[in-house]
């Protein structure tokens, strides 16, 4: 797993290294500044060849100290460098003060004031370096700093840059205005453009969570992580990382079809079966040995005309599903895509989760914003499964279940269904469905960021998983997957993994099916969600422009071959 850190975790790693005597703060600052200069020349080799002009904005903390190192190293290469300091030099931290004084032996430091800052409409700088706040940014920029940031932001719009030689904008660690923990932009209402939008961001030791979430990728530009010789990682209990798929487990070595699981996809009424068929195709292509679509009698003919390798079973209602599930070889279910919101659909979800009048789930602890308000029941049919399948991981063995789309809406409106969720379930909500399931958490996430660290999608997904007692996959370009035990991973389709073609109807149905297929094959819920989400993006990247949902399952064999599987 490629680890992502919060700003507090990064500070703790640095402090521990310094306290151990392995390195000094001054040495770390020198390495960081040198790393920025190296990254600049690696990204733009033409800047290495001859001298150029740079503007370096230094802030009142150690990020500003990194900026003084950058300025000194560029001056040593013959560059013309202007340095602007926001804050009082007398109050700089000790290491930053040392590098301030080193720079003062070579050049001038000008106070960062809006009136004296060069007008970029008429004065060209080849390189503008933002070393104002870094990971220490915790409140909106104000005063002269805000005005200068607004000027840079408005003077270097893409249309402006097309008229003249382009400036190269570089941020040290984190662009000013961006929360390193959440990826949210922290600005005042009166100065919404008071943030730095970089072409290149150079961070140190590990990437930060905010580099991959929300507005992070847009402000970061290209992200480069430089090693500055720090040992160790973040605390084991709170680690977050980029998704690492379990690729080796995708291989098939031996066995018959039922050795690789039997996935059951529940469909809605006639005329609404397309989503279930997409999910079924995803489950089949990911390698589930057998895939069956369960549908009402009137929908059988429609499905039969569109499916070959996928089997069909009539499932009229909850009792019908209970009868089908007497086949113990069925070990994973997918409910939601095109399922509907009627009593039949609610009954199917209830049976899948083990809810019945004869065998209610154990009571779930009350939480604000969870499911329907007290006193409201749900429309559930059937006697449930023959096995005591219950929620909260307290049963004798629950089938693995993916819940998407309509199933999520049904669960959001029924306390009993919500309480029946268990550790073998995977919820795959988009933002709207997440808000229905967890309205208080969603409201907290949607609140404007006024200070840092701001509440993040990682925080929200973890809180939701802990409340639901199951894996939650919060969909988006910055998908976050969280388990109730605190594990969390980010599957970000950004930077070199950008896949904008996934914004197409039915893509989420395929993802639900892929995850269901992985569950059928024996993947644990968190691993199934992570691996499925990662492959989903890889298929979109492999296919490229023109992608529609039907293309995603059919691209999986090509992706597998490219991965050497």
Image (cartoon, helix red, strand yellow):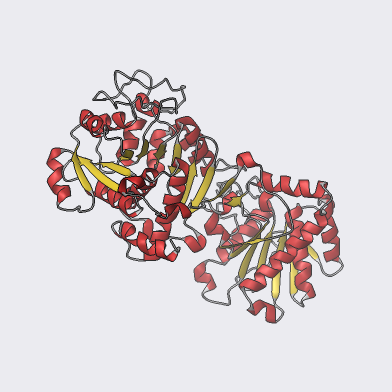
Closer-to-camera residue (223/525): 525
Residue 126 placed where, x, y %?
65, 74
State left or right for residue 192 relative to residue 300: right
Residue 560 placed where, x, y %?
40, 61
Q: Is residue 160 above or below residue 285?
A: below
Q: Quadrant of the C terminus?
A: bottom left
State left or right for residue 328 relative to residue 147: left
Q: Is residue 281 above or below residue 101?
A: above
Residue at 39% across, 60% down: 539
For residue 270, say whether it is visible: yes
Closer-to-camera residue (535/94): 535
Question: Which image quadrant is residue 125 in?
Answer: bottom right
Residue at 77% across, 78% down: 78
Residue at 60% across, 44% down: 239
For residue 178, say whether it is visible: no
Residue, far front: 255
State left or right for residue 42 relative to residue 21: left
Q: Is residue 390 above or below residue 138?
A: above
Residue 410 placed where, x, y %?
31, 32
């Amino acid at each position: 797993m490629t680890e992502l850190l919060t700003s507090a975790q990064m500070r703790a790693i640095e402090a521990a290294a310094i306290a151990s005597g392995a390195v000094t703060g001054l040495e770390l600052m020198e390495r960081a500044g040198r790393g920025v200069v190296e990254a600049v020349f690696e990204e733009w080799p033409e800047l290495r060849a001859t001298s150029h002009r740079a503007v370096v904005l230094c802030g009142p903390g150690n990020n500003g100290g990194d900026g003084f190192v950058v300025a000194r190293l560029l001056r040593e290469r013959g560059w013309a460098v202007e340095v602007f300091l926001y804050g009082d030099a007398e109050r700089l931290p000790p290491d930053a003060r040392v590098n301030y004084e080193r720079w003062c032996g070579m050049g001038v430091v000008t106070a960062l004031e809006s009136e004296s800052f060069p007008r970029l409409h008429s004065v060209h700088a080849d390189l503008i370096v933002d070393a104002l706040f870094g990971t220490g940014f915790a409140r909106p920029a104000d005063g002269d700093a805000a005005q200068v940031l607004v000027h840079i932001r408005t003077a270097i719009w893409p249309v402006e840059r097309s008229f003249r030689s382009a400036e190269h904008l570089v941020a040290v660690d984190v662009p000013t205005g961006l929360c390193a923990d959440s990826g949210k932009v922290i600005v005042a209402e009166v100065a919404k453009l008071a943030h730095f939008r970089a072409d290149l961001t150079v961070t140190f030791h590990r990437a930060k969570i905010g580099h991959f979430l929300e507005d992070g990728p847009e402000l970061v530009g290209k992200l480069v992580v430089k090693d500055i010789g720090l040992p160790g990682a973040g605390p084991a209990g709170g680690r977050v990382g980029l998704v690492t798929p379990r690729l080796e487990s995708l291989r098939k070595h031996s066995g018959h079809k039922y050795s690789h699981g039997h996935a059951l996809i529940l469909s809605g009424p006639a005329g609404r079966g397309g989503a279930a068929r997409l999910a079924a195709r995803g489950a089949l292509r990911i390698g589930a040995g057998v895939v069956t679509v369960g549908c009402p009698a009137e929908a059988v003919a429609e499905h039969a005309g569109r499916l070959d390798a996928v089997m069909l079973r009539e499932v009229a209602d909850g009792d019908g599903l209970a009868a089908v599930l007497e086949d113990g070889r069925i070990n994973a279910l997918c409910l939601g895509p095109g399922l509907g919101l009627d009593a039949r659909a609610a009954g199917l979800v209830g049976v899948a989760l083990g809810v019945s009048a004869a065998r209610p789930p154990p009571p779930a602890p009350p939480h604000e914003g969870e499911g329907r308000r007290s006193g409201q029941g749900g429309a559930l049919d059937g006697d449930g499964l023959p096995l005591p399948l219950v929620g909260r991981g307290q049963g004798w063995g629950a089938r693995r279940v993916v819940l998407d789309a309509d199933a999520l809406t049904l669960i959001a409106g029924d306390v009993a269904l919500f309480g029946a969720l268990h550790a073998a379930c995977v919820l795959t909500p988009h933002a709207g469905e997440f808000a229905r399931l967890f309205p208080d958490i969603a409201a907290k996430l949607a609140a404007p960021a006024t200070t840092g660290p701001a509440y993040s999608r990682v925080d929200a997904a973890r809180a939701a998983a802990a409340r639901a007692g199951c894996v939650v996959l919060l969909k988006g370009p910055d998908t976050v997957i969280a388990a109730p035990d605190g594990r969390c991973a980010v599957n970000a389709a950004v930077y070199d993994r950008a896949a904008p073609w996934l914004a197409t109807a039915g893509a989420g149905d395929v993802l639900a099916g892929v995850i269901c297929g992985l569950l059928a094959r024996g993947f644990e819920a968190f691993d199934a969600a992570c691996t499925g989400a990662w492959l989903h993006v890889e298929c979109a990247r492999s296919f490229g422009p023109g992608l529609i949902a039907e293309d995603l399952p059919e691209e999986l064999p090509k992706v597998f071959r490219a991965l050497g599987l």
